Image (cartoon, rainbow, N blue to C red):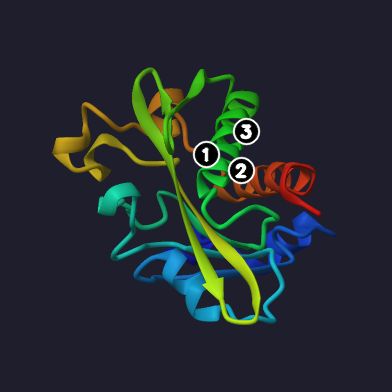
Amino acid sequence: MNSLDRLSAVKLREALGQCTIGREVIVLGETTSTNDSVLERTSASTPEGLVVFAERQTAGRGQRGNRWESAAQKGLWLSILLRPRIDISKSAELTAWAANIIAQSISERFALPAKIKLPNDVTINGKKVAGVLVEMRAQKNAPHFAVLGVGINLNHSAKDLPEELHSRAISLAMLLDRDIDREEFAVALLRNLNRTYRETFGS
């Protein structure tokens, strides 16, 4: 990987300032999935807001066991540790909230008609550009927690996507005919998630 193109945990953390979501940021070169990486780092005492990015996932997951294609350094692959004040059976509320904020962030920043395709996809012109996967976990003698996984196609070209996905998936770069500053968009997205999280799921 070209180090100049890599996400920087230090720069992301500094740009976010005081926040809940993003209070700790980790950037991995490679992992199986960012959800797995957050789960491995979580105990009953881990504060919510940890964000783990990966430049590449070898086993990224989507809904219903589907594989999420995550080409190295082409998109944003991240997971967030949350402790929402909702029943453990209501993970769909987190999924809907996250998908809505992703769609809003894309529409506001790039003037693209991002829409939610239930239950967990964000599409533009009918093609998938982002997806959300929420995994809730119960803990003994501690409140349950959630891991919110997000995948967004940013700088993919057609050759970066498997041929079978060409009719169903797209990236922001393909739509705008230019590369996207991944770090800048990551900060904008995390800020939007942080701003709306407390008012939606806080105590």
Task: Say if mark 3 contacts mark 2, CB within 8 Å.
Answer: yes
Q: In this view, does 16 lie to the left or right of 139?
A: right
Above or below, 101 against 123 in this view is below
- Residue 88 is situated, as x and y percent measured from the top left of the image, at 56, 57
Question: Which residue is labeled 2 in the image?
Answer: 185
Q: Which type of secondary structure does the marked residue at label 3 adopt?
A: helix
Mark earlier in primary sequence (1, 2): 1
- Residue 42 is situated, as x and y percent measured from the top left of the image, at 57, 78
Q: In this view, does 17 lie to the left or right of 179?
A: right
Task: Say if mark 1 contacts mark 2, CB within 8 Å.
Answer: yes
Residue 105 image label:
3
- Decide if residue 97 is in sight here: yes
Q: Spatial distance from mark 1 to mark 3, Cα to Cα?
A: 13 Å
Q: Nearer the viewer, residue 189 or 74?
A: 189
The type of residue carrying mark 1 is: Ile
Q: How crowded is mark 2: few (under 14 residues within 10 Å), some or many (20 or more)?
A: some
- Residue 145 is situated, as x and y percent measured from the top left of the image, at 60, 66
Above or below, 125 against 45 in this view is above
